[in-house]
């Protein structure tokens, strides 16, 4: 139908929600929500070897705060499924030895250059103007699709979703090759790599990344995740409700720049971070909003780091997190207390130091770059995951469980 008539999708596609489809010549009401649900639950896959991607440590290891384990009563395999949001899409991910499998349970259409939903524009202007740069690409990392899907299952062709996944997980990088190189660089990495294989460095939305890591100051992963959820629930747009949980897109900078945001966030338990979130958003809007982010993404590492330090509440560590996780500077080393402790494997002189001074911050970052090279930030992410208590305890417990299993008694020889 979409191929033959001018179609305008008026509602976000979402599992369990009726969709109204209108055209100039006809109006079709689709009310069979069960049919939509069955489409939304279809699994798709792309080739990705298990030794190139470990979902658990990559998604739950402190890079993004929008993922959690997925538990569903209607699925046979939920132990290693994860549900989360990126690119205004709600995903469920799992993997086999040879595939990364994904399921779309809710999505919003690609924003146009003014951050509006292209599906809500007049029919005449619904097609994107290829001569105008769509600033939404700064956040989504892929160009706006030129057409809607003709199958009716998803908004866009399957190639769009695969491209999003490839970029998000940096699947163009041969991680096995880098692991082999890093293992040769230092025995500390060699000891960690066997347990924490295939940890990938995510390539994230810089807007989300920046504000999430303002929340991260003096904080832990569970509480940061809770704060990020509150930001999305209060200032983002609802994508869908799935299995009783509502999922939201991450807010625009403009939404967080409103003067009333600081007081509201304080009420929600953000503390001093509330001021930094609102004032950074306000300054970014003054600097050009997504245009500023686009210019930021074009700077080299040192220039981008310096520019980020000009924002309220952003110090060297948060600036390095943004450079590493959303601006493509894989040599950036965010030095927090975890990384500082890890650095003592390489810099014995730090053994008696407890707090990171400005000088030590630079020394540690330079040492990691000296040892691990241009992808030092990625290597540091692997080591960071290995130091997280949640992963250490689970790995140790699994090893203990294997050692405690009763062995078969051998028959006595005659």
Image: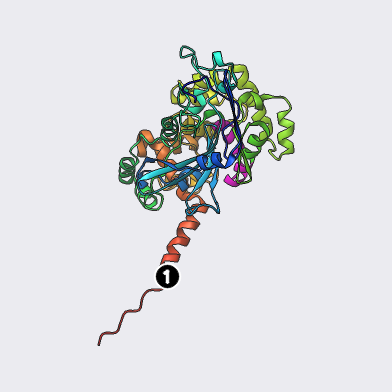
Magenta-drawn stretch, dominant element (helix, strand or loop):
helix
Residue plotted at (68% across, 30% down): 275
Q: Nearer the viewer, residue 334 or 37?
A: 37
* Residue at disc 1, secondary structure: loop
Q: Position of residue 217 (x, y in %)?
A: 60, 38
Instruction: Give, as a single range, the part of the protein colored magenta.
Output: 208-226
Question: Quadrant of residue 240 in the image?
Answer: top right
Quarter location, residue 399: bottom left
Q: Left or right: 237 with respect to 184?
A: right
Viewer-nearest residue: 372 or 83: 83
Q: Is residue 173 above or below residue 292?
A: below
Residue at the (71%, 40%) spot, across then down: 269
Q: Position of residue 404 (x, y in %)?
A: 43, 70
Residue 337, image x, y percentages: 53, 44
Q: Is residue 18 magenta?
A: no
- The residue under label 1 is 405
């Amino acid at each position: 139908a979409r191929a033959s008539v001018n179609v305008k999708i008026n509602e976000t596609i979402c599992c369990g929600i009726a969709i109204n489809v209108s055209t100039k010549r006809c109006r079709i009401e689709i009310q069979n929500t069960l049919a939509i649900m069955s489409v939304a639950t279809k699994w798709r896959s792309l080739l990705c070897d298990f030794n190139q991607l470990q979902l658990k440590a990559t998604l739950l290891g402190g890079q993004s705060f929008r993922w959690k384990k997925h538990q569903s009563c209607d699925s046979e395999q939920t132990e290693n499924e994860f549900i989360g949001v990126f690119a205004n899409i709600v995903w469920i991910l799992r993997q086999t030895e040879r595939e990364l499998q994904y399921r779309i349970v809710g999505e919003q259409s690609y924003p146009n250059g003014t951050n509006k939903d292209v599906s809500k524009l007049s029919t005449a202007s619904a097609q994107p103007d290829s001569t105008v740069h769509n600033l939404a690409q700064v956040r989504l990392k892929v160009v706006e699709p030129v057409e809607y899907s003709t199958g009716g299952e998803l908004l866009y062709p399957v190639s769009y979703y695969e491209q999003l996944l490839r970029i998000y997980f940096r699947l163009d990088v041969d991680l096995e090759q880098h692991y082999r190189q890093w293992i040769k660089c230092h025995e500390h990495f060699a000891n960690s790599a066997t347990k924490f294989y295939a940890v990938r460095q995510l390539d994230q939305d810089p807007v989300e990344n920046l504000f999430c890591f303002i929340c991260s100051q003096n904080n832990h992963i569970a509480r940061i995740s809770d704060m990020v959820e509150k930001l999305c629930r209060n200032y983002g747009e609802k994508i869908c409700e799935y299995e009783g949980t509502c999922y939201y897109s991450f807010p625009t900078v403009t939404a967080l720049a409103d003067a009333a945001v600081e007081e509201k966030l304080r009420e929600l338990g953000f503390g001093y971070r509330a001021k930094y979130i609102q004032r950074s958003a306000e300054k970014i809007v003054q600097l050009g909003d997504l245009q500023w982010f686009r210019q930021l993404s074009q700077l080299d590492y040192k220039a981008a780091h310096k520019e980020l330090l000009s924002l309220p509440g952003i110090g060297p560590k948060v600036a390095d997190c943004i450079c590493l996780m959303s601006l493509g500077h894989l040599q950036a080393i965010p030095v927090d207390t975890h990384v500082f402790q890890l650095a003592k494997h390489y810099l014995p002189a730090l053994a008696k130091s407890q707090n990171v001074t400005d000088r030590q911050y630079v020394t540690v970052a330079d040492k990691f770059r000296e040892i691990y090279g241009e992808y030092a930030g990625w290597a540091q992410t692997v080591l960071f995951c290995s130091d997280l208590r949640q992963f250490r305890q689970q790995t140790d417990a699994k090893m203990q469980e294997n050692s405690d299993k009763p062995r078969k008694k051998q028959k006595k020889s005659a």
